[in-house]
Image: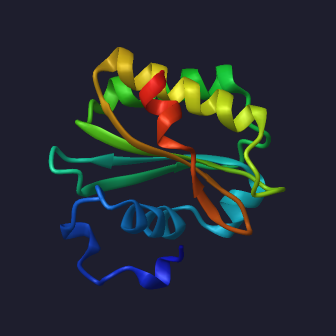
Amino acid sequence: MTFENLPQNFRDLSLDDPVLRGDAVDLFVGLADRENGCLSVVLLDADHRALQPIVIGDMGPAIPESVRYVLRTLLEETRPPAVVITLGRDGSPLFTDTDRAVHQVAVDTCRELDITLLGTYVATEHCVRELPDHLRLAS
């Protein structure tokens, strides 16, 4: 996945397509944010088109309870119909226990607020990877 694959009108397109969604995440979460740790939330409209990417940078290593607080505060304030959430971090592109814990925080928070979570991603300097959908559906 790479943002270079995005069509020029991608903001007019639904992010239901996981390839398009991954390319959008690659665009919105820059290398410096990945290296310094970040949380990205792309606010989507009811048709799952990108309205506004929000990147909270310089977070360092993710702490699930801190992510829960930030995510809940942001989503309670904005109340979007749907979101795409990304944890930007340095290190291995393989999923970690912290990645899975942050994913669970995203699932739980979106469910509590009745917001559709279209996907949760991990973005490292090496790649952008979506956490498996079965984790979201089983939660």
Relative placement, left or right, of 57 versus 94 is left
In the depicted view, which residue is nearer to us: 115 or 28?
Answer: 115
Q: Position of residue 66 (x, y in %)?
A: 66, 24
In the depicted view, which residue is nearer to us: 113 or 92?
Answer: 92
Q: How has the structure been colored for display?
A: rainbow
Quadrant of res 82: top left
Q: Residue at x 30, y 58 (%)?
A: 15
Relative placement, left or right, of 55 versus 8 is right
Q: Is residue 76 above or below residue 3?
A: above
Q: Position of residue 128 (x, y in %)?
A: 60, 62
| Residue sitting farthest toward the top | 112
Q: Is residue 133 above or below residue 135?
A: below
Q: Residue at x 61, y 67 (%)?
A: 30
Q: Residue at x 18, y 68 (%)?
A: 12
Q: Position of residue 6 (x, y in %)?
A: 38, 79
Q: Is residue 129 above or below residue 72?
A: below
In the depicted view, which residue is nearer to us: 71 or 7?
Answer: 7
Q: Residue at x 79, y 40 (%)?
A: 61
Relative placement, left or right, of 122 versus 61 is left
Q: How many marks?
A: 0
Q: Position of residue 56 (x, y in %)?
A: 57, 46
| Residue sitting farthest toward the right | 91
